[in-house]
Amino acid sequence: MSDSGRSEQNSSSPLENDSYEENEVTNESDEGKTDAEVEDGSKEDVDQWDTQGASLEYPNPLLDCLVLLSKYFHNPYTSDGIASGLPITDNAMTPELFQRAAKRIGISTRFVKRPLVKIPNMVMPAVLLLRDQQACILLELDKKQGTAKILRPESGEGEIILPIDKLAKSCTGYCFFVRPLYQFDKRSEKSDEKENKKGHWFWGTISGSWRIYRDVFIASLLINIFAVASPLFVMNVYDRVVPNNAFDTLWVLAIGAAVVYLFDFLLRTLRAYFIDIAGKKSDILISAAIFSRVNNITMASRPKSVGAFAKNLQEFESIRDFITSASITTLVDIPFMFLIIGVIWLIGGPVGYIPIVTIALIVLYSIIIQIPLRRSIEEGQKTASQKNAVLIESLYNAESVKLNNAEGVMQKQWENAVGNIADWGVKTRQLSQSSSSFAMVAQQLTTVIIVIVGVYQISEGNMSMGALVASVMLTGRALGPMAQVAGLATRYNQAKSAFTSLNEIMSSPVENPDDVKFVHRPVFKGEFQFEAVNFAYPDQEQAAVSAININIKQGEKVAIIGRIGSGKSTLGKLMTGLYTPDSGAIRIDGVDLRQVNPTDLRRNIGAVSQDVNLFYGSIKDNIVMGVPYMEDDAIIRAADLSGVSEFANRKPSGLDSIVGERGALLSGGQRQSIAIARALLFDPPILILDEPTASMDNTTESRMKRRLIEGVKDKTLILITHKASMLDMVDRIIVMDNGRLIADGPKAQVHEALRQGKLKVS
């Protein structure tokens, strides 16, 4: 039987072979045994197999289809690399997330409703959505033979051929047409395309709603045309109805005006709705893009102050307010002022010059105050960032503040920041209010001047009474948007300042650049090579590590020891890809770490950092962070190995017990146990443990060490510690001092050299 035939027969629901009956498979040797005996015997048979190559799989049909597509288009990605940073819930990728993920790996998608038989071969491959939340990749339809060639994620990369009718019964009628995005090479790129070839994070999103803003513009055009209805109605009543007592004409004009007002109401409602829809869409997409970028920023590019950084992110509120508030309406209405002024010119002649002069004066005044207004807003936002930094630092270190009686110091910093914010706020409001007052006074004076000029025009017979009244009404309508220019300028400067801050964040280097193709390595053995590695932290002149040359073999157990500040933890951060060397190279299994997808790298490394950070939630939530779909057996295994079970079992809620913010409800040793459980959860081939038992007592440490020695037999272990008691876990010791490697060899040999004082340590 062919491979495709076997694949078809063994494929699972909803494409399973209906004639296949599992209960028909029997074993003659089991005859006469009870069900329990047969079951026990089966288990013994399974245990005799070498199952080392088996992997624990968590079906995610659409994500698995993307993995197959990336291989099909010769740009392979792992499922972890594709799903990294996406808000996947319950391990189920939705069609919307499928499109987002596909775009990230260079695949264009179009979601359509199309019967199976109407999908042309020229658009294949296509991803079919099947019943029971399954999916497959359609490669070919042979209508003459009545067969379809597909790829099923759960069947690996083997092609399956099955009848079209059978596949059609399982289809939902929805599918994705997919194709690789065409990539221009660097020779054809222009200088301005290198930064904008995938669209700006803000302008690209806004331009995606251009059809909505087009409708807003059309609605505004009609609204401004309808705005002349009232003045024209009044003019005709004054000039034609009143002198002639033409009551029939009066009612005709009134009915016409009422119809215009009804349509005006509907258009204004629709315009507001369109602006809200566009604003909501942009808000969701931009917010998601910003947060995704923040999580993807390299550690070397992260800001010094978390509080100030958080405040800069909050400044997106200013942009959101600007694109969803009346500011957009005002901006759209401003060009139509000249339409209304044109009407004034038609009915009032030279009177039309007066509002033009007024508009010029208001614009001139607004331009004059822009420089101080912009500076006031920018300084106010800087001070607000400083205030937020003080707040976050004070809350985060509340215990240290109290123990050191530093409340007064923090209070002084807070009050200074609040005082500066108040000062700049007063200046901003004064400038904004002055612009509003100037516009209001100018509008009132314009009305008076128009009446004066209009009276002279009437006396000369160049204008009627109705035309004068209509001109006054139209002038008020034309200058209406100008009265809002002050508030508009303030909101614009706030949004612009926020945009500048966010644009700097969005321009920061990231770990997964879109234009970088990483080496496809889903599994690593655990060999590390440091080749003349030098590294200094950002804004630090002194190197953290210098001229490091180390070779760590697969399965080796190595300890890195040294004084504080010697560079031990820095080596761990370099091996996990949190930082990249300034010079030299670090290789894992012979591949430069810079060529490896960070997600793939960290899935193969169980890391415990020196500073353990927990999140609000349960013990279990903190263990499975990053892999929420993990099975309970794996969680319990990690909890047992790390010692979490020892204290969790003493709690009424067990693993569901709440740890508090930053693990405040747990001891330091308990927090470290949870961090170790995280590292062991996926049973990775590499473990990098930085002071894993620093907060544990001797008894707990001894039990932990005993369990870890058994659990890491076949793994590469890098243990960063200053505890001599932990060295029982390793066979080799590396000694660091002042960023340099001063010793590297078997444990006994290095121990003896340290004891005899042969190693010079500063």
Image (cartoon, helix red, strand yellow):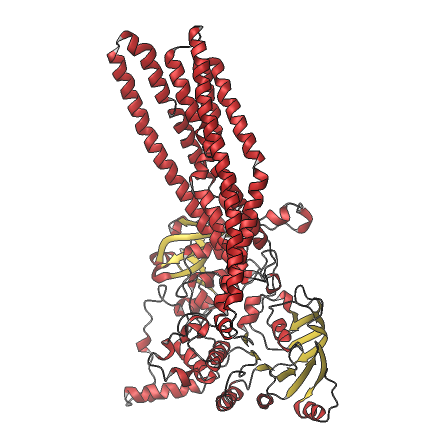
Number of numbered labels in the structure image? 0
| Position of 429 relative to 358 (above/below) | below
Q: Residue at x 27, y 15 (%)?
A: 250
- Residue 36: x and y in percent read 30, 87
> Which image quadrant is residue 731 in?
bottom right
Image quarter (top left, top right, bottom left or bottom right) of the N terminus: bottom left
Residue 376 visible in this rendered orientation of the protein: yes
Image quarter (top left, top right, bottom left or bottom right) of the C terminus: bottom right
Front residue (pair 565, 640) = 565
| Position of 550 relative to 16 (above/below) | below
- Residue 13: x and y in percent read 35, 66
- Residue 599: x and y in percent read 54, 67
Q: For the view shown, which residue lies furthest in the top direction? A: 460
Residue 103 visible in this rendered orientation of the protein: no
User: In this image, 711 relative to 753: left or right?
Assistant: left
| Position of 575 relative to 378 (above/below) | below
> Which image quadrant is residue 257 in?
top left
Q: Residue at x 25, y 17 (%)?
A: 251
Front residue (pair 603, 644) = 644
- Residue 690: x and y in percent read 57, 79
Front residue (pair 235, 385) = 385
Front residue (pair 226, 130) = 226
